[in-house]
Amino acid sequence: MLKIPQFPFLSNITSSYCLSFSLMAIMTTEEVQSVHMFFVIVSVMPMVFTGYFLVKTAIMFFSFDPDCTHAHLDWDLALGLFLFTLFLVGTLSLAWRVTALQSTCMALLLVTIALILAVSGNIIKGGTESNDSKTIEEYYRLETYPSWAQKFLLKDNDWHVFQKCIFERKICENFDKEDLFQGGCCKPPVYCGFQLKNQTWLIPETGLYSDDANCLMWSNEKGKLCYNCDTCKASYINDLSLKWYLRGVVIMSAVAVWIISFCCSHGIEMDNNRRLNRTIESA
């Protein structure tokens, strides 16, 4: 028989902090119920946030991605639905005091966060390593990213959809010099030595600084630019993994609020019951 995980140590640790904000006298049943309902209301906040994320993602999924930076909206939709379900079940179990179900939801959320942060963090770390930072900017070296990430994120169909999107949405026409994503797809790499004149990148009289494949792939045609460059692919991988890493951090914050609500509610109630029992026994 599968044993459902419990986290009594969380309740014991957190309740000690929660009790510092309450009177040490025994609370009445009504007061305990009020405290419990307060934390139930607080635990709804992550569910509301997740619901907003889910609705926003669904709108983009069934309409269009305005800036092409939300690749794989189907992943976001699945994640949003999964998190919303867990937060909903967890909040209801908190309201109904189903401790085992709350612990199960907490365990699933913590595992989800760990996976998101571990995978996305590993990809981002790969993109920040550069053995030749003087000639090739960080984040734009495709070879520094894990091979499994390249194969998984740069599948032919997904990559072609992305290229088509940035062309149709005219992403490169509103160029931002500080945008990492545009820097890899909308202009030639700095190390190539192209010179910008009248909004056109020209080969200097002395020739290109490098015969790198990215330099040779560059084209001033609006439909080509550096869309096929490895620098564009690298910035695409980095942008996607960074967004998922930030999602993991935000979800972790939401789960922290939820865990505190769970621990405080049960911790205060359990402590109050213990003191009440001691009072009855000593009477």
Image (tube, grey):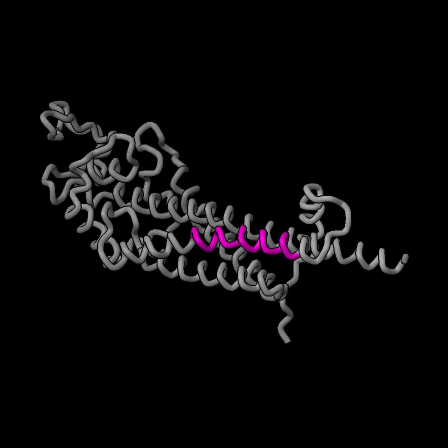
Horizontal side of residue 21 vs 189, given as left or right: right
> Residue visible at 85% across and 56% down?
279
Q: Looking at this view, is 203 or 181 the one in front?
A: 181
Identify the residue at image location x=70%, y=56%.
269
Total label count?
0
Percent of width and height locating residue 78: 38, 61
The C terminus, quarter of image: bottom right
Tell which of 190 and 45 is nearer to you.
Answer: 45
Query: Would residue 85 appear left or right of 8 to someone viewing this image?
Result: left
Q: Residue at point 71% right, 42% down?
A: 20
Quarter of the figure that contains the N terminus: bottom right
The quarter of the picture where residue 90 lies is: bottom right
Q: Residue furthest bottom?
A: 1
On screen, residue 10 above or below 82: above
Secondary structure that dominates the magenta span: helix
Q: Residue furthest top?
A: 206
Q: Position of residue 16 (x, y in %)?
A: 71, 46
Q: Is residue 283 above or below residue 251?
A: below
- Image-quadrant location for residue 9: bottom right
x%, y% of residue 270? 72, 57
Q: Residue at x 22, y 40 (%)?
A: 185
Residue 48 highlighted magenta (yes or no):
yes
Q: Position of residue 91 (x, y in %)?
A: 53, 60
Q: Is residue 196 left or right of residue 68?
A: left
Magenta region: 33-49
Q: Is residue 180 left or right of residue 26?
A: left
Q: Foreground residue, 115 or 147? A: 115
Which residue is nearer to you in this view: 97 or 201?
A: 97
